[in-house]
Every structure is written in structure tokens, then in C-alpha cells.
Amino acid sequence: MRSSNPVFSRRGFSRDSGYAGSNGTQQPQAGNPYATNPYATNPYAQQPQTAVGPQGAPPVAPPHAGRMTMDDVVARTGMTVGTVVVTAALAWIVDLSLGLAIGAALVAMVLALVQAFKRTASPPLILAYAAFEGLFLGAISNFVDSRIADGAAMQAVLGTMAVFTAVLVMYKTRIIRVTQRFYRFVLAAAIGFVLLMGVNLLFAAFGGGDGLGFRSGGMGILFGVIGIVLGACFLALDFKQVEDGIAYGAPREESWMAAFGLTLTLVWIYLEFLRLIAILQSE
């Protein structure tokens, strides 16, 4: 069952055996105990599969016009992340106020929710989300870098890149294996994390200070590390989505959904790094 939450939504996961097609049907694949075809109703997926992937990975579909490829995913992700970077740089240069930045963050959240509820990817919607998210990131990064922790933004960028590279290597070498159990664990941990942060925010809003202390001091550091680890786990889910989409012959439009998921996850990791660095340098 697909979640409507843009943070938790990972296309194709189901409660039963890991993946479901768009009409809820599943097609087990020989040789892979964990994966079934998440694109069972895709006409391209009906073509015979001649190549077999690495042990524990889904079989690889032969090239076919209209199918998602790794080049598609890289290009769409580059466009989406590039839009975030460009608008973030613009917000930094013009010294965008925090009030406008929060407004941009709210708009980005609404756009992300709209895309999450849509059955198909909307490139303009995804790029608009990236633009508004970039405005928020640029303004908040400028604020932290200039008033709290000098150099925090660059350190957060390097940290995000390091996590991305490490998870990609561990996923490709099968050190990390995305199974239904892994997915359920990550989902439960993320829900608990978000709920705790929400409660902390409410206490901070009505009681003043830092609420329950989950965003500063020792507890803030601990939850910052937990947030980064969760982001790394979501990256593994994103890589699984891309791998299965290519292996099972997903339509090319799915590359936009893959780019959208990767961008959401990278933003999550970057913000957790930025907050963690700010706490460490202010102690």
C-alpha cells in the first residue's frame, strides 16, 4: 500500500510481500525471494526478461523505448536537485528573510503533498517544489552560517554527499538489503521520529524554550544523528525504487518520481546535518 506522506511514500511497496502493481496484482520473479513486479500492469513489463541481475537483485529488463533508464533518473534528479541549488544560492545572495523563507517552506510542503497524492508524476509540480524548497534552504543556511555556526552550510553539504556516497556503495555491494522487514522498520522509526519532533514543537510553541529538549544539547545531538541515519535508510529505499523501476520496465515518467523521492531524502539529510552542526558548534 502506498503512503500519501511524501516523506514515507515509496512507490510500489505493499503490506503483503513487498511490492504491488498499480492494480494491486503481484508477479513473483524467479530467483529473487524479496521482489515482485511493481509494474505488473505496465505494457512494457509484459516483454520477456532475458538478463538476470546480481544475487538478491531483480532481473534486468532488456532495453525498450519508453522505459525508465538510469540516464533518465540521473538527468531528472540533476534537474530537480539543480533547481534546489540555484534557488538556494539566490536566496543566500539576496539575504532572503526568515519570514519569507518559512512561507516558501510551507508552499514547498503543500506542493510535495499534492504530488504525493497524485497517481502520476508532474514535472512542473516537482520542479516548483524544488524551487521553493531551495529558497527555504538558502535562507536558513545563510542564517545558521552567519549567526550560529560559521561554515555550517558547506559542512552540511559535504556530510550529505558523504552519506549519499556511502549508502550507494553499501547498496550496490549488497551490504544493505532492502526487504519488507527493512521497509517496515524504517517506516515505524520515521513515524516515531516525526511524532516526537511534532510533540517537541508543540511544547516549544506553547511553553517556550526548546520544548522537551529534543532539538538542543545532548538530546538534540542524539536526535540529529538518528535523523541522519533515518535519511540514509530512506536513500536505500530510493535506490531500491530506481533499481526495480529499471529492472521491471517502468514507464519513463517514473524517473520523475524517483528524482522527487531522492530530492526529498537529500533535503532531509541536509537539514539534519545543518541542525546537528549548529548544535555542536554552539555547545
Image (spheres, grey):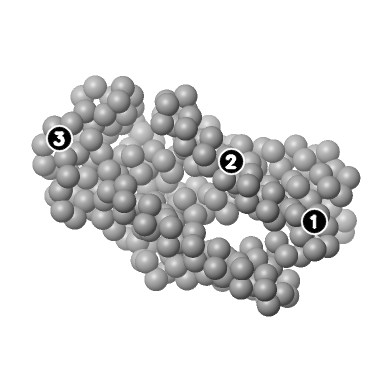
Distance (Cα) linking label 1 and label 2: 20 Å
Residue kind at label 2, given as amino acid type: Ala
Residue kind at label 3, given as amino acid type: Gln
The front one of 228 and 147 is 147
Q: Which mark is residue 162?
A: 2
Circles 1 and 3: CB atoms closer than 8 Å: no
Q: Position of residue 239 (x, y in %)?
A: 41, 40
Question: Dot 1: what SS?
Answer: loop
Q: Residues within 10 Å of mark 1 (few under 14, many from 20)?
A: some
Q: Seen in the image, is 108 located left or right of residue 19? A: right
Circles 2 and 3: CB atoms closer than 8 Å: no
Q: Position of residue 123 (x, y in %)?
A: 37, 66
Residue located at (70% from left, 61% from top): 141
First in sequence: mark 1 vs mark 2: 1
Q: Which mark is residue 150?
A: 1
Where's the C terminus, which quadrant? top right
Residue kind at label 1, given as amino acid type: Asp
Front: mark 1 or 3: 1
Q: Which residue is mark 3?
A: 49
Q: Which mark is residue 25?
A: none
Front: mark 2 or 3: 2
